[in-house]
Image (spheres, rainbow, N blue to C red):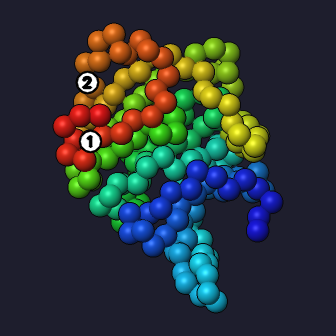
Amino acid sequence: FSPGPDDHALYDPSGTGLLWSRGGSGRFEVLRASVLGGHGGLLLSDPLTLLRGGARWVVPLAWSPDGRTLVASFGHPLEPMTAVQLDPATGELRRIEGGLLAGSVSFSADGRVMAVATTRGEGASRLLPSALGNVIGRWPRPTEARAAGTEVLLGDPSGPLAALELGELADWGVPTGLSLLRDASGF
C-alpha cells in the first residue's frame, strides 16, 4: 500500500517469505516479509529491511538455496550496477567486482557454487551518479543498461570468485541472464 515502486520480487530460500525492492520518500531498500495464511488467503507479515540503498536504487538479484548469501545491486538502472553479497546471519557485506544486471547471478542447487555474469558500462549514461537511482528507479520499467562485453566469475560464495576464460563469447555484449546447472558443471 505504499506509493513508491515495489519490484524485483524473489522467494526466499525457505519458500515462506518474499524479498523485493521498495522505493519511497526518496529512498530505496530491500525488504523481506513472511507469507502467512489467514482469512482464506495469503497475507504478508510486516516487512523487515535487509539492505538500504539510500538515494541509490537497490535491487535483489539472487538468494542462495542454503540461505547464506543474498546478492543485490546498487546504482542506477541505466548502467551495470555495483553488487554486494550479504550474509544475512552476520550482516557482513562483500563487494562483487564488475557491473551486474538483473538475472546475472546463479547458484548451484546446494548453494556451494556461485556464478556471476558481469559487464562494464558504455555510453554517456555511465557518467550519471548512482544517486540518480532514486529518480531513474522510479520509472515504470527501467531501460536496459548500456554495457559491453561479458565476464563470468565462478566460485564459493564465501571466497574469491575466479574469472572463466570465455574466448569470443566475451564479446557478445550485455549478459541477459545466467543459470548454473544444478551440479555447477556448466551454465
Q: Is residue 186 visible?
A: yes
Q: Which mark is residue 5?
A: none
Residue 184 vs residue 53, the one in the foreground: 184
Residue 2 vs residue 83, the one in the foreground: 2
> Mark 1 to mark 2: distance in Å?
16 Å
Location of the C terminus by quadrant is top left
Q: Position of residue 66 (x, y in %)?
A: 29, 61
Judged from this view, the residue extending furthest toward the front is 40
Q: Identify the residue under disc 1.
A: 181
Residue drawn where x is 46% and y is 26% of the image: 175
For discs 1 and 2, the disc positioned in front in the rendered view: 1
Report the amino acid beneath label 2: Leu
User: Residue 47's quadrant in the figure?
Assistant: bottom right
Q: Is residue 156 left or right of residue 23?
A: left
Q: Is residue 20 left or right of residue 155?
A: right
Residue drawn where x is 71% and y is 40% of the image: 141
Location of the N terminus by quadrant is bottom right
Q: Position of residue 122 (x, y in %)?
A: 58, 16
Judged from this view, the residue extending furthest toward the bottom is 39
Judged from this view, the residue extending furthest toward the right is 3
Residue drawn where x is 37% and y is 23% of the image: 151
Q: Are marks 1 and 2 in contact (CB under 8 Å)?
A: no
Q: Is residue 50 visible?
A: no
User: Residue 91's quadrant in the figure?
Assistant: bottom left
Point out the tag, 1 or 2, that comes first from the N-terminus.
Answer: 2
Q: Identify the residue under disc 2.
A: 164
Label 1: element kind:
loop
